[in-house]
Image: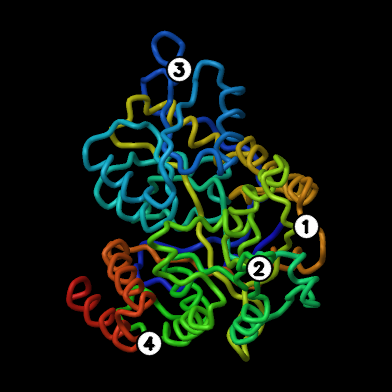
Amino acid sequence: MTASNTPARVRHPLVKTLSAAAALSLALTACGGSSEPASGGDGNVTLSVTVWNMAKTPEFKALFDAFEAANPGIKIKPVDILADDYAEKVTTMLAGGDKTDVITMKNVTDYSRYSSRGQLQELTDLAKSGDAANLAGLDAFNVGEKYFALPYRQDFWLLYYNKTYFDKAGVKAPETLTWDEYAKLAQQLTKDEGGKKVYGTYHHTWRSVVQAISAAQTGGDQLSGEYSFFTDQYNVALGVQKSGSTLDFGTAMAQKSDYKTLFETGATAMLPMGTWYISALLDAKKNGKTDVEWALAPMPQRPGGSGVTTFGSPTAFAVNKKAEHADAAKKFVQFAAGKAGAEAISKVGVVPALQSPEITSAYFALDGMPTDEVSKKAFEPDKVNLEMPVSENTSDIDTILREEHELIMVGDKPVADGIKSMNERVKSEVLN
């Protein structure tokens, strides 16, 4: 698997965006600099790590099992948090002085928030040692030439689809789609299936479903305070919703809809989502929890564009500033970002930040992976822009954009009014 990760536009001079595609190097060097024995005084350490939806996120178990096998004196204790509540819960934990050792950085926005508040231990020594500089996505964690997390996976967005529904509708694999063609296809695929409504597509409630893809494909800057470039994508999203081709936003929010459940039960024919979902799909298929025949396609594009442009974000591990077992925590972070961690997660369908030809081959040989040419093409987008640029303003702007996004999607504000509010609020509350 290869992906071209082209830097997104970034305002902050100290932070670069996604780095170029994957590294071919292997292991990182051992960490050091602390007097605390990694395995603790009695030779045994229980290392706590925050995770989300442990049962549906097999990468965590794969990593933990591999790390424990390589480090017999250290056991992992997952701190499992509901995915939709993860950011809020971790924010509360860190603010309250929680001592969980390792904090999983679900996205760079949360990373910006925690690192700017001094809640993470500096890991610059790890980031600048061995082959760590070759980790895809590492630059997104550069804050003034300091690093407080290391990426272990590198995801980007593509389009999942239900092959059975496409076959029944006589629709070929969607190798190239404009957003207008996608909206029409969603309407075509919406139907009643055995008394159950099948939506043509499902748009999850995250603002990135509209805003990040819009920024990536128009070159818009989400930190700029000017958001007219969101207009076309909101018109697409609201049009799909108005036609009944997707579960409406208000219902999805009220029910805390799970995109995995919707796709795996055949409630939707298409699903724009990140590559992280592949591992969960493979696991669900392997364990008989879904019989959906699925494949992948590139994200739809704006008309007149050339190539495939999408967005993505690295996922990383950081060490809590108040960690009880700091050295063991750094050892885990280093392991996850290194060759052994990459091999462990690639076996369950996760795209590692550190890659090699051997790891890539193993990834595509997994049982259940689609092997058609369109699916393979989906893994080779021409450009992957960072989901949200990182700066000292990222967290505050993210909150405003999310609030206004929800008001637009539930119909409380017309698109123009919502975008006007974004412009005014970001400028008055953050930039000025």
**Which comes before the other along the chain, label 2 or label 3?**
3
Q: Position of residue 145 (x, y in %)?
A: 37, 53
User: What is the CA distance from the residue labelled 4 to the residue labelled 1?
Assistant: 38 Å
Task: Read off the residue under disc 4.
Answer: 228
- Looking at the rendering, in which quadrant would you find the N terminus? bottom right
**Which comes before the other along the chain, label 4 or label 1?**
4
User: What is the CA distance from the residue labelled 2 to the residue labelled 3?
Assistant: 49 Å
Task: Read off the residue under disc 1.
Answer: 370
Q: Looking at the rendered structure, which numbered label has been put on residue 412?
A: none
Q: Is residue 131 left or right of residue 287?
A: left
Q: Give the secondary structure at mark 4.
A: helix
Q: Position of residue 201 (x, y in %)?
A: 59, 71
**Which comes before the other along the chain, label 2 or label 1?**
2
Q: Give the secondary structure at mark 1.
A: loop
**Which comes before the other along the chain, label 3 or label 1?**
3
Pair 2/1: label in front: 2
User: What is the CA distance from the residue labelled 3 to the residue labelled 4?
Assistant: 54 Å
Q: Give the secondary structure at mark 3.
A: loop
Which residue occupies 65% across, 53% down? 278
Q: Looking at the rendered structure, which numbered label has been put on residue 39?
A: 3
Q: Give the secondary structure at mark 2.
A: loop
Q: Amino acid at mark 4?
A: Ser
User: What is the CA distance from the residue labelled 2 to the residue labelled 1?
Assistant: 16 Å
Density class for disc 4 (Cα within 10 Å; few <14, some 14-19, many ≥20) is: some
Q: Amino acid at mark 3?
A: Ser
